[in-house]
Structures are given as structure tokens and as C-alpha cells.
Amino acid sequence: MHQLTLAEIARGLADKKFSSEELTKALLARITQLDPQLNSFISLTEDLALQQAKAADARRANGESGALLGAPIAHKDLFCTQGIRTSCGSKMLDNFKAPYDATVVAKLAAAGAVTLGKTNMDEFAMGSANESSYYGPVKNPWNLEHVPGGSSGGSAAAVAARLLPAATGTDTGGSIRQPAALTNLTGLKPTYGRVSRWGMIAYASSLDQGGPLARTAEDCAILLQGMAGFDPQDSTSIDEPVPDYSAGLNGSLQGLRIGVPKEYFSAGLDPRIADLVMASVEELKKLGAVVKEISLPNMQHAIPAYYVIAPAEASSNLSRFDGVRFGYRCEDPKNLEDLYKRSRGEGFGPEVQRRIMVGAYALSAGYYDAYYLKAQRIRRLIKNDFMAAFNEVDIILGPTTPNPAWKLGAKNSDPVAAYLEDVYTITANLAGLPGLSMPAGFVDGLPVGVQLLAPYFQEGRLLNVAHQYQQNTDWHTRTPTGF
């Protein structure tokens, strides 16, 4: 049963081939057996999962149906879950049990999804490798000596290893798409505002967006359907109708205009990945797409702009973790200042501390105009580049990452080298655009992804293109040895 996709599970449950309770027990046993190799989960929620599975079976027995009714999933451990630890991968929140459900959690639970647990992640979603977690690094199931990508690496590793069919993630600068690429999954970052951020612990508020990780575009469509929608509790949520994503998967690609930015093929890109990207272009041309070269001239400024804006917002968001109201508190503080300093110094890991310091500096008097304001202006130029490009093409295609997954610890001494792995993904977050990564081949036995970007609220177009590509290729069906 562990090889079934979400779509296949929905059909199996509808045909009474198995029950949600049987499926849930089988996957919980598989997680218990195999996850010690991967470290992809922070918390397992066996009691809740079995309770939800029994309830889903009862709902089906009463005549209810739905693609997510009885389907097992997991949540990245920054989505608040009532009464269950929500740690954000940090010592700071190791003892925090959320008093409410995030909107995403509540919506998926209402649709009948079964929560198996909370997945490991880079601390406060800060990282590209899932090595900064307080609970230890996550391993890539394709090669246990390599990283799975981050910050949604726990969700990605669990789905890639067939511990469950799909999971939620969040994407601030590529944190769904990059781990999807490095673990042979399909991962979708929706348009900013498409999925509620209420109850999703913030890293950088103007960039974060929740989305699905699964093996196929079809499964991402099913999970996104349950996640998307307007939420009056979230001031960044946009009141835009949610289309039926699954209904649009089989549309023809005849005449689809695909733009390939010349800036993507620079010296930093592994030439073997470039070859796989162009092979995917040829596959889409066979399906009727038309391809042209385009330019995104301000892409070169994306990394410096992002690594000013994101840490600035992080330093503001993380100021609430002070040892006073909730979370970690140091032992025997001498006074209030000592409480603040030691609680934050002991509760936050080195990467989080590094980004808080960078952000606080960028926002400080005398430097705000020179750094933060200038970065926001560059952000607007990047958005304008995309708007100009989408006057000429329907989607933009390129590599998701410049390199395949690297070895655990290989970039720990050089944070900037890790930051450069986000070069192709962060522009979508700066502009607020939807982006999708889909499996496109292997380099040295490690998966490689191709990224698709579309205009605002065109997630359906991305899913359609990815689904049609997956109907004609088999990269997404490959399974890591041993799983």
C-alpha cells in the first residue's frame, strides 16, 4: 500500500479495497521501521491518526466521498496543531504545544485527511539542506550521505521514501521546490496569498507560502485543492475563487508558449542539469508547446536582495521568542536582560542567530535606506521582469537547482555557498508568483528537477503542464533503493 499515490488511495478507498484505518496502521508501522535511517519526522501522532482514520471510514460508510477523505498525510512542523508539539525544528519551541490548528491543518482535517505526524525541518525554516534542525539533519533517501534539501526536507524525504503519499511544506525562497528537486518529487509553491498563512509560524512574512509535496502533479492538485482558499483570519490571504485543479490536468499543451531565460544557463549551473532541462523542453515540444528564449535581466540581483529582505523580516518575527510568554526559558536568570539574552542565545541555533543579526543590522538606523529599501526596489524590478516576460510567454521553464544534492556537512563552513543553491527559486518568492518543480532525470544517481513558473493564480496551468509531462515520462515513478 505504501507505493500508492494519493489519487490511487482515493480510488482504493472508494472501491473498498482497503480502509483508511488499515492504510494508516500500515504506514505508521513503516515509518517506525524506516524513519530512524532518515530522521524525517519530529513527532508521530499515532492516536490522532487512528482516530481520524476511523472517523473517515465512518464518513465513507455514510455515503460521503472526497479525494482526501481517509488519505494519510503529514504536516511540516511549523503548522500549528492543537495539543501537539509544534517545534519549528528549534529548541526554542521544543516544549510548545499549539492551542489551536493552523487554517491549513483545519481545512485538510475537515476534508478528512489523516495526520500521521509532524515532519523535520530547518530551524524556523532557515536553510537549504535540513541540517540546521535542533533534532538533527534529515537524510536523502536516494543517498543517505546527502542532504534532502530544505527547509521542507523532512516532508520531502518522507514522501520520497514512500513513508506516506504526500505532505505539506512551506516555501520562502524555494523550500518546497528545492527539496522536491533533490528527492525526485513534485512540489508546488502557490501564488502568495493563495494558501492561508494563519497558524503557520512565520520566517519572512512577505515571502512565506504553504504548498503541497507529492510524487505526482495529480497528487499536488488534490492536496492543493484542500489547502487553498480565502481566510479572513489572514490579512495576506487573497479572496480569489479556487478552481478545480484536478479537472484541468488533461488540457492540451498545443500552442503553449514556454520561455527559457538565458540568464539561467550561467557558469554556476551543472552542465548535466542543463542537458536534462533541455531534454524536458524537447519533451514538451513533442506535446505541442512552442519554446522561445527570454531574458530576466535583474535575476543577478535576486540573491543579495532576498538575503536582506528575508533576514530583516525574520529578525522582526522572531523577536517575540524572548523566554517570557512561551517557548524555551533559560535557567535562573539574574534579571530581565539576562533572561532575554540567555533564552535567545540558548534557544536559537547558529543559522537562526546569523540571520537575526543580518536582519537587525539591515533594519538599523542609518542602514535601512542603504540595504532594506534598496532590496525592496530590486524586488520590484524582478517582478517587472516577470510581468514583461509573461506578455510574451505562458510559462517560464528552467532548472530548479544549480547542482544535485550535496553531501551532509559539505557547505556548513560556507553559508553563502548554501545560499547560492536558491538562485533559481527565490525570484518566484520575491515576485509572489506560483512555481512548481517536477522530476526530470538523474545526475550521479541523484534526482534533478525542472522548475515551471506561471503568472499569478495560474497554479492550474503549472499542474497541467507537469501532469502532461509525467504522462509521457517515468522519472517521477522511480523509487530510491531500500525504500
Image (cartoon, rainbow, N blue to C red):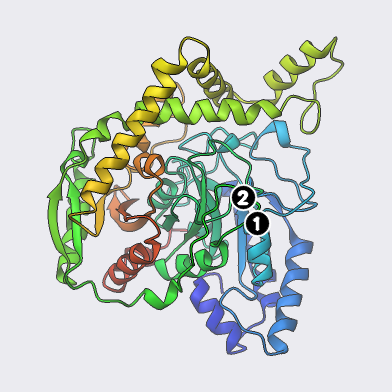
The 10 Å Cα crowd at callout 2, few under 14, some 14 to 19, many 20 or more, is: some
The 10 Å Cα crowd at callout 1, few under 14, some 14 to 19, many 20 or more, is: many
Q: Which residue is mark 2?
A: 234
Q: Quadrant of residue 415?
A: top left
> CB of mark 1 within 8 Å of CB of mark 2?
yes
Q: Which residue is mark 1?
A: 103
Q: Secondary structure at mark 1?
A: helix
- Decide if residue 221 is in sight here: yes
Left or right: 198 as drawn, with respect to 351: right
Image height of 28 relative to 362, above or below:
below
> Residue flagged by tag 2: what amino acid is it?
Asp
Which percent across, then down, holds residue 328? 77, 29
Q: Secondary structure at mark 2?
A: loop
Q: Between marks 1 and 2, how big is the CA–CA gap?
A: 9 Å
The residue located at (63%, 65%) in the rendering is 108
Which percent across, then down, holds residue 437? 36, 54
- Decide if residue 32 is in sight here: no
Which percent across, then down, holds residue 352? 57, 26
The residue located at (28%, 41%) in the rendering is 384
